[in-house]
Image (spheres, rainbow, N blue to C red):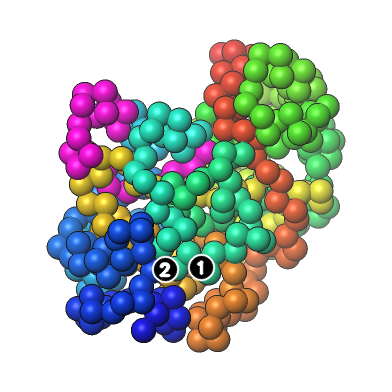
Amino acid sequence: MDIHMTHSLFITRRHVLGLLATAAVCPIQAATPWPETLRAALGQTVYFNAWAGSERINAYLQWVAGELQRDFGVKLQHVKISDAADVVKRVRAEKQAGRKDTEGTVDLIWINGENFAAMKRDALLSAPFAQTLPNFQWVDTAGKPTTLVDFSVPTDGLESPWGMAQLTFFADAKRVPKPPQSMNELLALARSQPGRITYPRPPEFHGTTFVKQALIEHAPDVKALAQPVTFAALEAQAAPLWRFLDALHPQLWRGGKQFPQNSAAQRQMMADGELLLALTFNPNEAANEIAAKRLPTTVQSWQFAKGTIGNTHFVAIPYNAPSKAGAQVVANFLLSPAAQARKADIDVWGDPTVLDVARLPAADRARFASSVRPGQLAQSAPALPEPHASWVDALEKEWTRRYGV
């Protein structure tokens, strides 16, 4: 039996003993066949450090934990965090303290962007594993190239894709009948309705993404953004950005002197009628909120005509994870059609899948079938690549210097 050809690649605990006798298997590394990884994972506890700012996501992870315990004998412990950067600092401190390869406190981390770049640069990650997970064969690496490149940094198998994200705006069509299709059109709308638009305060990642979107639309040489930032590049490429923000901020909520702390606060201000629009990295967020009866059915979602920033979020295994086998089993389950379809369900989370659904077996393809819901994105725009991860810190520091006081 070739586990690459199983119906849904959902290999359960009761299959482990049978698989151990199987010769044709998919290796995690050359010397570690997948059945041996499953056996090593039995009884392990995986401490998954993941953002806990959403009740829906927390509930989804509780479901994942139940499935893993039942089918693989792996206990998933959700370590609730507010910022992955804090976890990176902890793993770095453990390495500096001489913690050995199995003496860490983190088995799996939800990560992307500058945090992944830092862990890769400082050799804080375990050996490459992602592309040898059995379920990785279903990942849409061709249609979704950010599953292999994270903020212009090649993943090199050091992190496994989990979900897709793209900057998306939403507003009540009664109040915004003609949604802006670019940053310049957003500026025009702000000028026509001063005090009714804003964005979250960087370094909150939605706010930083808003700034990066404006950077991409105004940079003289967009290709330069794919390279590590330098002082000269920041000066040359960001000069039009600061001119744009200088023009935009006086038209914003509270004259651009204050900003919402996060996207949830901005969404609530929109729901209360204080703001015209909100933004998200989940194209299904408005549909989620409508389904939960927190937004009216007249809310619509859109992305700018020429595209908005898109990326993939991942899970990664630190170099000193005590339960590396269990972490791989978790990462593989998160890529299963069953887990990806449930995550994509608007009533559960609504996080877009990383899989190529068209290539899945018919039964697994059917898991993703659903009717269009109010608030869902009517048409996706091109996903624009993130600037190199090094731009994030540089932009946030300069934004804070200019507008943060």
The answer to which quarter of the image holds residue 224 is top right
Residue 67, position as x, y percentages in the image: 29, 71
Comparing 74 with 61, the one in front is: 74
Quarter of the N terminus within the rendering: bottom left
Residue at the image point whose x is 44% and y is 35% from the top: 120
Q: Where residue 137 is drawn, which disc sits there?
A: 1
Q: Secondary structure at mark 2?
A: helix
In the rendered structure, are the residues bearing label 1 and label 2 in contact, judged by CB atoms less than 8 Å apart? yes
Q: CA distance from mark 1 to mark 2?
A: 7 Å
327 vs 181: above or below: below
Quarter of the C terminus within the rendering: top right
259 vs 384: above or below: above
The answer to which quarter of the image holds residue 192 is top right
Q: Badge 2 is on which residue?
A: 134
Residue 83, position as x, y percentages in the image: 40, 36
Neighbour tally class for label 1: few under 14, some 14-19, many 20 plus, Cα within 10 Å: some
Q: Which residues are magenta?
A: 90-113
Neighbour tally class for label 2: few under 14, some 14-19, many 20 plus, Cα within 10 Å: many
Left or right: where 220 falls relative to 324: right
Residue 298, position as x, y percentages in the image: 69, 63
Q: Where residue 181 is drawn, which disc sits there?
A: none
Left or right: where 30 falls relative to 323: right
Q: Secondary structure at mark 1?
A: helix
Residue at the image point whose x is 65% and y is 61% from the top: 142
168 vs 226: above or below: below
Is residue 85 something one can see in this rendering? no
**Residue type, mark 1 in image:** Gln
Residue at the image point whose x is 36% and y is 46% from the top: 127
**Residue type, mark 2 in image:** Pro
